[in-house]
Image: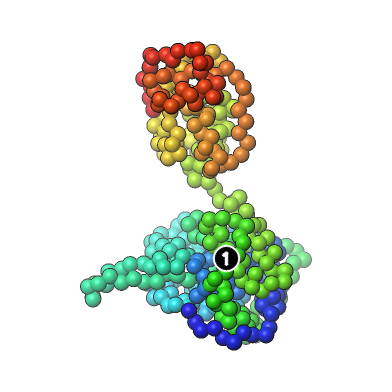
Amino acid sequence: MTSPNPAPTEPGAVILDAVHAAITRYVILPSPEAVDAVTLWVAASHAQPAWAHAPRLVIRAPEKRCGKSRLLDVVEGTCHNPLITVNASPAAVYRSVGTDNPPTILLDEADTIFGASADGNEDLRGLLNAGHQRNRPTIRWDAANQRLEKIATFAMAALAGIGAMPDTIEDRAVVVRMRRRAPGEKVAPYRERRDGPALRALAERLNQWLSAHLPELSAATPFMPVEDRAADTWEPLVAVADLAGGTWPDRARRACETLTAERDGSTPPSDRIRLLADCRTAFRGADAMPSAVLLERLKADAEAPWAEYGGTGLTAMKLGLLLREYDIRSSNIRFAPGPFAEYGQVKGYYRADFADAWQRYCPGPDKVPGGKPSQPSQPSLPSSTPGRLLSLGRLEPSQPADTNTTAGTA
C-alpha cells in the first residue's frame, strides 16, 4: 500500500462534484444515478490498494453513436493510471497488471473481443473475472526457468462496446446502458489536446484526496443496500461516497440499488431458472401433475425454448436432469378423480416439491387453490413422506396406501 500523503484541505464532496460536472459536460448518461455511479467508480480507481474487490465498469449501447467511447475518454482522463486499448493480447495485459498499485484497464470496442462472432479470448475473459477479487492470481508454467509463475490479476477495468458483455463480467460490474442523444440534448465537444489537461488535473485532485485516506478506506465497512457479489462490486464506490460526505452517501446507495435492479431485470435467466418459472406457470395451481402434461404445457409456449430444447425438444429425461439440480424428482403418482384422472398411476411431479426452489430462485406469487388431492403410490416415497402428505391434504389418515406400483418413465 502506498504511503499516505498529507491530508488535503479540499473537501472530497467538492472534488466529486467537479468530476460529476466534467462527465455531464461531455456526455449524456441515461440517468442521474448512472452519472453518480461513474463519478464514484472513477474516484474509487484512485484507491485500488484499499479494496478487496475491483469493480468493473461496463459501458454498453444498443447501437453506434450513443456516447460510449466519449464516456470512456472522460473516464480515461480522470481515472488512476489509465491503460487503454482496443485489441490487447492477454499476455500484455497480464504483465501490465502485476503491481501493488495496478493501472486501470480500459477496453474500447469490447464487443469485438467478447461478441458473438469473437473467439479465442477466454484468457482475457478469465483475467477480467479473476481480477475482480484480490489474491486470485493466474498460474503459468515458466518453461525457461522450470517453475510455476503466479501472475497478479487484480485491477479495476472499464469496458465499452455494443451490446451486452459476457454475463460473468457484467455480474462483477457497474453497468451503464448508454443511449443515443435525443433532439435538444446538447453536450460540449471533447478535444483531447484542449480538454485533456483539465481532466488530468481532476485526476490529480482525486488521487491526492484518496491516497491520504487509504488506511481509513481499507478498514471501511459501509452499510450496503444489496448483497453478495453486487455488494462486493459496489462497496468501494459507497465507501468513497461515505468518505466524501454531503449528499454523496445517499446518492451512492440510490445509484447502487437502481443500477443493480436494472442489471438484474435485463439479464436473461439461465435455462434452469427459466424452467422453474415456466413450471410454475404450467402447474396452474394443480397440486400434482403427470410428467406428460407438464411437458406438453411447457412445449406449448411459443416464446419458450422447450419445444426445440437440445435440438429435439424437452423430454422427460431432460426435464428430470434439469430439475434434479434443485432436488426436484418425479414420483409414481396415482391421480384421483379430477382433471388428470384418465392418467391413472403415472410418473409426475408434486407442486410442493418446487416450492423451495421457486422461493429461492424465482420468487413470485404461488397460491395453491384447494381441490381434490391426488394419491401417491406408496412404495416410491421415502418413509417421511406420508406425514408430509397428510399436512398437504393429499392422503387421508384412515386411507391405506396402495402397495401396487406402476413403472413409468423418468
Does residue 255 lie above or below 207 as drawn?
Answer: above
Mark 1 element type: loop
Residue 119 position by quadrant: bottom left
Which residue is drawn at the image coordinates 38% and 14% (left, top)?
404
Q: Relative to residue 410, is residue 361 drawn left or right?
A: right
Near mark 1 (Cα within 10 A), the count class, few <14, some 14-19 or many ≥20, is few
Does 356 appear above or below 108? above
Pick the residue in front: 317 or 27: 317
Query: In the rendered image of this protein, does residue 95 appear above or below residue 317?
Result: below
Q: Is residue 289 visible?
A: no
Task: Identify the amino acid type marked 1.
Answer: Thr
The picture places residue 200, in percent across and down from the top left corner, at 60, 83
Q: Identify residue for label 1.
A: 221
User: Where is residue 320 shown, x and y percent of the image?
Assistant: 41, 33
Picture quadrant where residue 380 is located: top left
Q: Percent from the top left, x then y, of residue 300? A: 53, 30
